[in-house]
Image (tube, grey):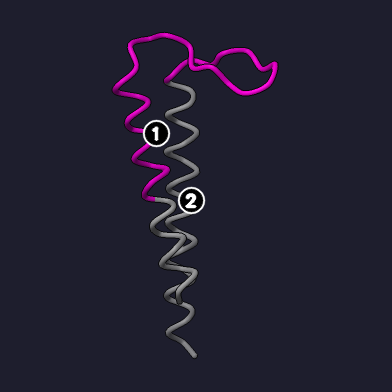
């Protein structure tokens, strides 16, 4: 159950960061680490929102399954 709560918090943080990147940047490419080319803020925001949502769903499922035992 504890890991499910942690997953919910991490997923909420990722979704919030994705929304921040999507709304706060003004169209400039976001620098990626290494030798990767810069990506558009919209693409970064969508990926972060989707990964955060998936993490939150997995955390909720973990909490739900922990209550079965």
Magenta segment: 12-41
Q: Give the residue drawn at x 53%, y 17%.
A: 31
Q: Residue 20, percent across and down?
A: 32, 30
54 w.r.t. 41: above or below: below
Query: Can you tell which of label 2 and label 1 is closer to the viewer?
Result: 1
The structure residue drawn at horizontal position 46% and vertical position 36%, both measured from the top left corner, is 48
Of residues 26 and 50, the one drawn nearer to the viewer in this rendering: 26
Disc 2 marks which residue?
54
Residue 54 spot, x, y in % from top left: 48, 51
In the drawing, what numbered circle is on residue 36?
none
Q: In the visual, does 62 lie left or right of 18?
A: right
Is residue 46 located in the magenta-colored stretch of the structure?
A: no
Which residue was labeled with disc 1? Answer: 18
Mark found first going from the N terminus, 2 or 1: 1
In percent of the image, x 35 and y 24: which residue is there? Answer: 22
Check contact, mark 2 vs mark 1: CB within 8 A.
no
Label 2: which secondary element: helix
Q: Quick one: 21 or 65, which is closer to the camera?
A: 21
Label 1 crowd (10 A; few <14 / some 14-19 / many >=20): many
Alpha-carbon span between mark 2 and mark 1: 13 Å
Residue 47 lies, in percent from the top left, at 50, 33
């Amino acid at each position: 159950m504890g890991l499910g709560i942690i997953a919910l918090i991490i997923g909420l943080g990722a979704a919030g960061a994705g929304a921040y990147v999507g709304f706060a940047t003004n169209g400039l490419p976001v620098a990626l680490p290494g030798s990767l080319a810069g990506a558009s803020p919209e693409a970064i925001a969508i990926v972060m929102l989707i990964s955060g949502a998936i993490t939150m769903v997995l955390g909720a499922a973990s909490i739900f399954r922990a209550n079965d035992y």
